[in-house]
Image: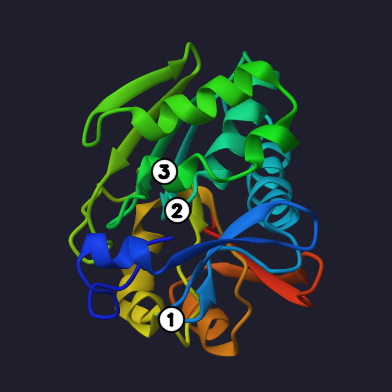
Amino acid sequence: MIPATSAFPPEATAMQNLKVIDTGDGSHTLLNLEMDETYHSRHGALRESQHVFISQGLEYLLSSQPDLQNIRIFEMGLGTGLNLILTIAHALQHPERAFQYTTLEAFPLKQEIIRELNYLDLLENEQLQKLFHQVHTLAWEEKQEVLSNFSLTKREQTLENFTMSENNCDLVYYDAFAPNKQPELWSFEILKKVCGFLSAGGVFVTYSAKGQLKRDLRTLGLVVETLPGPPGKAEMVRASKPR
């Protein structure tokens, strides 16, 4: 997740304010001590990412557009890389499809923090374990080939400063900190910008189910669904751009 520029101190200090904690499914997340906010659900980081972004996002997109062969994904933001590695796991299982993944992170995590996370133990796949290390060490601001069918571009910048052509992605993983922690990233203008990235039939998915978020997405012309959330959360939101 991308911390708000105004809410965080310089990078070195911000890193000192992060603590690795266990979540309800045994997977780790990070707690920002200054904000008292976690990067994932305390009820289960792995379950949350799998449910919200993979099951209700990526898998839904592919079931609704079975002929889609080139999947363009935009993630806001990279954080621990959990959404990314789960998407790579999906790409490994579907070599017939090509994936282009762009992710933002204004404050990349340092390697000593990445090494503390227990995702490698939970993945139980040697290739994924190697790829998890690889994606965190790849150069920023350059398109990198992670697999023959998976390219990755990491951008070290804020969403406010990020630009992408309109109608240029099929799926948005919106994974900012909660609206009460980062309200500027849930503003109508920012949502308008992000929804403009979506191509016809594209999908926006997030763990949040705030009423204002749903109203804004509808105002922007998206078809909004309120879905059951992951364990510990009653609801989540998926919104689709009409074809």
Label 2 sits on what residue type? Answer: Gly
Label 1 sits on what residue type? Answer: Met
How far separated are the C-alphas under marks 2 and 3? 14 Å
Residue 19: image location, x then y, percent: 51, 64
Residue at mark 1: 35
- Where is 205 relative to 229, above or below? above
Quadrant location of the N terminus in the rendered image: bottom left
Lateral position of residue 40 relative to residue 131, left or right: right
Lateral position of residue 125 relative to residue 187, left or right: right
In the foreground, 210 or 88: 88
Q: Earlier in the sequence, mark 2 or mark 3?
A: 2
Mark 1 against mark 2, which lies toward the viewer? 1
Residue at mark 3: 112
**Pointers 1 and 2 in contact (C-beta within 8 Å):** no
* Residue found 59% across the figure and 88% down from its top: 211
Mark 3 secondary-structure assignment: helix
Label 3 sits on what residue type? Answer: Glu
* Count of all numbered marks drawn on residues in the image: 3
Residue at mark 2: 79
Q: Earlier in the sequence, mark 3 or mark 1?
A: 1
Q: Earlier in the sequence, mark 1 or mark 2?
A: 1
Lateral position of residue 142 relative to residue 213, left or right: left
Q: Is residue 98 visible?
A: no
Residue 98: image location, x then y, percent: 51, 21
* Residue found 54% across the figure and 20% down from its top: 130
How far separated are the C-alphas under marks 3 and 1? 21 Å
The quadrant holding residue 122 is top right
